[in-house]
């Protein structure tokens, strides 16, 4: 049987295209249970996209949860090795609230995890696959990249610690330069450090252009190491011919209790929020008492539904709506329908017209013959 992609929605197409992409780089499909013990998610709520968790009591009295996240389940269930690298991809349903709807939803999510001995190549491979994932969704895409080491290093050099550190990170994340400068003055941060913090907060440039700007504010070992990491990533992305779509943006901040190193978010044209998110999350593994390193990302397929809205006027339910009169010979109806199918056309056959249908052509069949009533191409 011939298969046509025309029958698939945007998120369904993405599932198959992304799985094929990940398989090309050795990421094997991983299946997880629909639910885990509630405590796994409750202890790591800040790692979740949505902190709302759908829970229930099992027959043995244990509190369980329908999984709101895949990464935690994978980490929990794989062996801990710091010298072996595991590469997994997944297509899983998660259960959580969505930003564009009320209540819980079943959301199909796809992504990948690279867990174990993570080196520069492993990091760059994941970043490359994140960018190519976006490319399968739209040619108009951008991956915004930051490095927690750069941000944390600058805050340390400025003497910003404790609760103050959290306040500064929130202002940088929201790119609220005015409030950031006011807080700097209240905490008596030096003018040089104020300008460095302003530069880091306001920076948003393609990575090639951003690196020289960053070089001008490097202070201390942690920032230098983060800079060298970003420089290496830039060079590798240039080899992949992807550097033009990679931007540095230090407002991309993931929870510092879980993430270290690089983190990123992916955007495509016509969708106002990120459709992909990920990064290096060694600290999460350490919280779960594992030695390995880890990096990965998820594609939020529910957000791809918005792409269909913009194209709704050009999407048809069928190529032909074949309307027949009551009493028309059934054999004649089947003959015409089969003939249209052989021409590769999608046909809706009915006796009474449905005005809600979208079609390229409306035909009417009677015992006397076929009449074309309307053509929309």
Image (cartoon, rainbow, N blue to C red):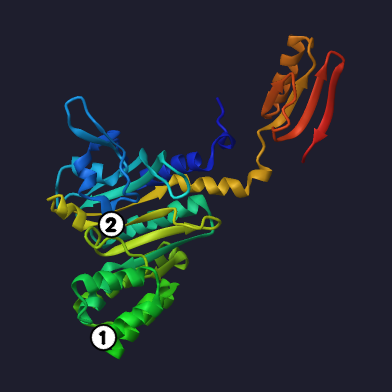
Measured along the vertical axis of the image, is residue 143 above or below residue 49?
A: below
Residue 96 or residue 240, whichever sits in front: 96
Report the side of 31 relative to 4 (left or right): left
Where residue 111 sits: x, y (%)? Answer: 36, 47
Where residue 187 sits: x, y (%)? Answer: 25, 83
Report the side of 350 relative to 203 (left or right): right
Marks 1 and 2: CB-CB under 8 Å?
no
Q: Which residue is mark 2?
A: 122
Quadrant that contains the N terminus: top right
> Residue at 72% across / 25% down in the picture?
340
Q: Quadrant of residue 163?
A: bottom left
Q: Which residue is mark 1?
A: 189
> Residue at 28% across / 46% down in the picture?
71
Where residue 349 sits: x, y (%)? Answer: 70, 21
As helix, strand or loop, the secondary structure at mark 2 comes to helix
Report the side of 205 relative to 319 (left or right): left
> Residue at 28% across / 82% down in the picture?
218
Query: Is residue 211 visible in this depiction of the protein?
Result: no
């Amino acid at each position: 049987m011939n298969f046509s992609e025309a029958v698939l929605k945007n998120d369904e197409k993405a599932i198959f295209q992304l799985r094929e992409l990940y398989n090309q780089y050795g990421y094997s499909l991983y299946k997880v249970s629909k639910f885990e013990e509630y405590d796994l998610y409750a202890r790591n709520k800040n790692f979740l996209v949505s902190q709302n968790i759908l829970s229930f009591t099992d027959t043995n009295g244990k509190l369980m949860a329908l999984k709101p996240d895949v990464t935690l389940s994978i980490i929990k269930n794989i062996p801990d090795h710091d010298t072996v690298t595991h590469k997994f991809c997944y297509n899983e349903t998660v259960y959580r609230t969505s930003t564009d709807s009320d209540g819980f939803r079943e959301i199909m999510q796809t992504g990948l995890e690279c867990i174990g001995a993570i080196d520069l190549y492993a990091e760059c491979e994941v970043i490359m696959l994140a960018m190519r994932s976006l490319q399968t969704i739209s040619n108009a895409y951008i991956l915004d990249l930051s490095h927690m080491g750069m941000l944390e290093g600058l805050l340390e050099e400025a003497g910003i610690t404790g609760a103050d550190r959290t306040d500064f990170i929130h202002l940088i994340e929201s790119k609220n330069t005015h409030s950031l400068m006011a807080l700097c003055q209240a905490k008596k941060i030096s003018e040089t450090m104020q300008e460095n913090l302003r530069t880091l907060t306001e920076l948003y440039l393609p990575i090639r252009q951003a690196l020289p700007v960053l070089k001008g504010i490097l202070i201390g070992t942690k920032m230098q190491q983060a800079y060298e990491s970003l420089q290496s990533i830039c060079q590798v992305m240039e080899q992949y011919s992807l550097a033009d779509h990679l931007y540095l943006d230090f407002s991309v901040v993931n929870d510092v209790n879980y993430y270290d190193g690089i983190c990123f978010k992916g955007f495509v044209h016509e969708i106002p929020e990120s459709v992909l998110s990920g990064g290096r999350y060694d600290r999460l593994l350490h919280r779960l008492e594992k030695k390995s390193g880890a990096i990965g990302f998820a594609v939020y397929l529910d957000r791809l539904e918005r792409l269909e809205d913009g194209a709704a006027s050009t999407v048809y339910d069928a190529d032909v709506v074949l309307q027949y009169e009551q009493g028309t010979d059934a054999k004649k109806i089947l003959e015409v329908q089969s003939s249209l199918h052989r021409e590769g056309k999608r046909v809706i056959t009915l006796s009474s017209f449905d005005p809600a249908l979208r079609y390229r052509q409306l035909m009417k069949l009677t015992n006397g013959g076929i009449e074309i009533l309307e053509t929309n191409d």
